[in-house]
Amino acid sequence: MFRYTKLKPVLRRSICRSHIRFNSSKNPNHNNDKNRGDNQESSSELTKKDSNHDIQDFKIKQASSKSAPAPMENTGIEHLLKKDNKPYIPKFQHKRVTFDYPELPNEDEYNNLVKVPKKITRWSAYVPKILTVIAVAWGAYTLKVWYFDNPEEGENSNDLLSPNEFHKFIVTHKEQIDPDHFIIELKPKYDRWELSFESNPDSKSVWNGQQFWSVEIKQPDINVVRSYTPLPLHYLKSEYTRSGERKPLLKVLNPEVDDVKEKGTMCIYVKRYPQGEVSRYITSREVGQELELRGPQIEYKFPYHPLNKLHQRPIFKDLPSKVEPDNFIESIKKYNKVPDVDNLNFYAAGTGLAPILQVLFSENPYLGFVNIHYSARKPGEIGILERFLFFLHKLDRVNVTYHFDSEGKSSIVNKNDINKPEIPNYYSPKRIESSTSNLSPEEALQVRMSILKGDEHKSEVIQQLIKSTEDRGERYDTALDQAKVTSQQPKKAAALSIVCGPDGFVDYVAGSKDLVTNSQGKIGGLLGEKSWDNSNVYKL
């Protein structure tokens, strides 16, 4: 009894405090009177309850605040958050429960095969990489060769020119003589031909004074070609010419001193026609631009003469004083008993002068004397080329007669400028056949027999050198000294005539060509009136 009564005030205070703590969420703005009443009622209720029950059985119903989370009782989340402590035991074989396609039956022979494990070596890792690198390199090489490294036409050729394909040349200089006439210097774009040229320069050289040859120049826009005659000339350049202080000097190619690169250089003499697609295209090319050339196309070969195999005339050079004398020709003719080479008449108009200049400037120039009849509208159309003709005249190799339309009809070539054909000094088999083509079989046989009788007196090839002055003949120090003597000697009339120029000029001098059959046609015009025929006339 004493024990219970002593603890009663303590229990009352604790109960009141807990009641106030758990009901702290109530509105604090209530008046004091109401709070006092509530406290009195709660204290009285607790007093009554304490008197009726034991303190161990007393329970307080707690009230949570509004900010507390919602109670989670019997929601099942505790089961989900519970950690699974079951240990993981891996299976040695996985059995598939569901599948899209049925498996093979267990009795299938393929299921019973023993699978040999794959052997992994060091090479098994490198071989795929090596094969991949090889495949990529081969693909890159193929792409480069077939698409990016396609060589141009003529790039890999061993020859300077080819009659079957076009070779590219670069314009390195262009000299304008007048509004219509040009001299254009060309050099090959590629230099592969130089290797083969140095190994055999005699056979690889295109400059041969025993024939006329030309090249075809293409106009790529309309795919049309025209023939032009190259000249063995080149322009001598220096730092003064490149700066514009001086003009380049036009020189003749000299195989004895010129570099291999210069030997591939050539010049073309071009006239620009208002309606000429190719000529306008060529003359519009500037320095550094390209032209496509195909050739050489052999236009005409001089009749065979045995003296050409025994002797070569010294090449023409820029100045007559530099040209070597021809001291051995008379002795060679004497000991071999071969006649002189036939003299030549060359009738040219405009740019038709280029073929005879090619022959006279080339190696092994023509051995006979050449009478040139050059026709033009006015003087000065050939420009600096006239200087070379003057030098050739001083060397007693040519005689030039100019015919200009601007000087009147008296200056035009006429019958007085044409002589009758001379009998050839030597008949080659081809020349015999051409000269007897219009004769009867009996007459042709007589001509051939008379030629054979004359050949019986010819001796064999020279067997010893000429040592005596009498046999060697007079010796000259320069070609000019020799020309002073030979120019005083009478010249034999020409036995061969070549005509080159516009169609109207060719028709006027030698008759028109047969364009249907692309043949020479019958000889007419001025030459036909003087008894010239197809055996001694050729139209270029």
Image: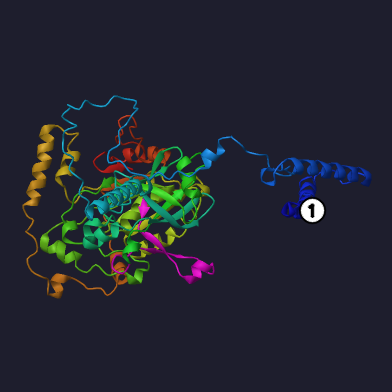
Which element carries disc 1, helix, strand or loop? helix
349 part of magenta stretch = no
Q: Nearer the viewer, residue 49 or 231?
A: 49
Q: Nearer the viewer, residue 119 or 423?
A: 119
Q: Is residue 443 above or below residue 420?
A: above
Disc 1 marks which residue? 9
- Name the spot of residue 149 as percent of width and height, x first: 35, 49
Is residue 8 among the parts visible in the rendering? yes
Q: Give the residue at x 48% y 50%.
A: 285
Q: Is residue 114 above or below residue 5?
A: above
Give the number of marks. 1
Q: Is residue 5 above or below residue 325?
A: above
Is residue 419 among the parts visible in the rendering? no
**Relative horizontal placement of residue 95, taking residue 224 as reference (left or right):** left
Q: Nearer the viewer, residue 228 or 532?
A: 228
| Quadrant of the drawing holding the C terminus | top left
- Name the spot of residue 382 as percent of width and height, x first: 46, 55
Write the start and end of the magenta stretch as one range.
229-258
Question: Which of the 4 image quarters holds residue 183?
Answer: bottom left
- Name the spot of residue 385 as percent of width and height, x first: 42, 58
- Name the spot of residue 200 as percent of width and height, x first: 21, 60
